[in-house]
Amino acid sequence: QVQLVESGGGLVQPGGSLRLSCAASGIMFSINAMAWYRQAPGKQRELVARIASGYTTNYAESVTGRFTISRDNAKSMVYLQMDSLKPEDTAVYYCNVPRGRAGDYWGQGTQVTISS
């Protein structure tokens, strides 16, 4: 059974930082790309960052230079370091395993709120 469990969300002031973690189980973690998505109220879910099995990374333009995705294959963990946070970063953040036509795997999400 595949499980993706996110943690690390919370309430932070603008300009602050958070580090999200995702613990994966039930998959061959090292061979899978991993990603973080987010969904703000009233908006579509959007890709935030992706890291390939070979560690190549891609970021949404809105977070480039502020967010960093990383992975630890030994621990089956993927992280999202978020710095210089803005109110528009407020959303539920989801861990994701992209699987194309086979259907992605998703975590339950963790709330990130940026507010003073």
Image: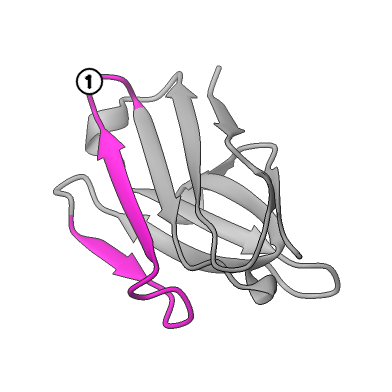
**Which residue occupies the foreground of this view, 42 or 19?**
19
Residue type at mark 1 is Ala
Q: Position of residue 87 (x, y in %)?
A: 69, 72
Q: Position of residue 64 (x, y in %)?
A: 36, 75
The reply, left or right, for residue 95 in relation to residue 70 is: right
Please report the residue visible at 48 percent of the width from the left and 81 percent of the height from the top: 62
The image quadrant where one finds the N terminus is: top right
Residue 18 visible, this orientation: yes
The reply, left or right, for residue 49 in relation to residue 16 is: left
Residue 99 visible, this orientation: no
- Does the magenta run of residues contain 74? yes
Dividing the picture into quadrants, the one containing residue 90 is: bottom right
Please report the residue visible at 47 percent of the width from the left and 26 percent of the height from the top: 23
Q: Position of residue 32 (x, y in %)?
A: 30, 40
Please report the residue visible at 48 percent of the width from the left and 68 percent of the height from the top: 84
Q: Residues within 10 Å of mark 1 (few under 14, many from 20)?
A: few
Numbered range of the magenta stretch: 56-76
Residue, far right = 42
- The image's colour scheme reads one colour
Dividing the picture into quadrants, the one containing residue 10 is: top right
Q: Which residue is mark 1?
A: 74
**Which residue occupies the foreground of this view, 61 or 84?**
84
- Does the magenta run of residues contain 42? no
